[in-house]
Amino acid sequence: MTMMSQERNTLEEYDEILKEIRELMIAKNADYGDSWRTMRLSSITDQILVKAYRIRSLEESKEPPKVSEGIESEYRDILNYSIFALIKLRETKAHSADHGDL
């Protein structure tokens, strides 16, 4: 496999996952609305940490989980929470710039 075809495969896989993540966000947004917008950035960070600890627990467990959508679901949630955190960071920077806080 050439470097160019490896890159193409990586980019295609990356785009496919981003599409899945976006679709998940849209579906969950229909259920929960923009509830993440009321969260502080530190609360979003806490959610990411909870998901990371859950992944570690699933990886180390010898038994299948009793209640879980699996590791992939946890990673998807981390990606969406990370995007929400980036949005909040940008909003904070924009607000600070508008009010001369920089």
Image (spheres, rainbow, N blue to C red):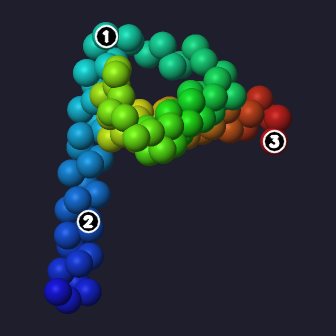
Depth check, front residue: 73 or 61: 61
Q: Which residue is mark 1?
A: 31
Are discs 3 and 2 less than 8 Å apart at CB?
no
Residue 96 in view of the camera? yes
Give the Cα distance between marks 3 and 2.
Answer: 37 Å
Residue in the image at 20% along x and 73% along y = 8
Q: Which residue is mark 3?
A: 102
Three-letter amino acid code of the residue under disc 1: Asp
**Residue extending furthest toward the right:** 101
Three-letter amino acid code of the residue under disc 3: Leu
Tell me the SS state at disc 1: helix
Depth check, front residue: 41 or 78: 78
Three-letter amino acid code of the residue under disc 2: Leu
Give the Cα distance between marks 2 and 1.
Answer: 30 Å
**Residue extending furthest toward the front:** 62
- The numbered dot on residue 96 is none
Q: Earlier in the sequence, mark 3 or mark 1?
A: 1
Q: Earlier in the sequence, mark 3 or mark 2?
A: 2
- The numbered dot on residue 11 is 2
Residue 70, position in %: x, y?
32, 34
Are discs 2 and 1 less than 8 Å apart at CB?
no
Residue 10, position in %: x, y?
26, 68
- Left or right relative to 34: residue 31: left
Q: Is residue 4 above or below residue 52?
A: below
Residue 22, position in %: x, y?
29, 36
- Left or right relative to 1: residue 78: right
Residue in the image at 34% along x and 22% along y = 66
**Image quadrant in which the N terminus is located:** bottom left
Residue 39, position in %: x, y?
60, 18
Classed neighbour count for the residue bearing mark 3: other residues with Cα under 10 Å, few (<14), some (14–19), many (≥20): few
Tell me the SS state at disc 3: loop
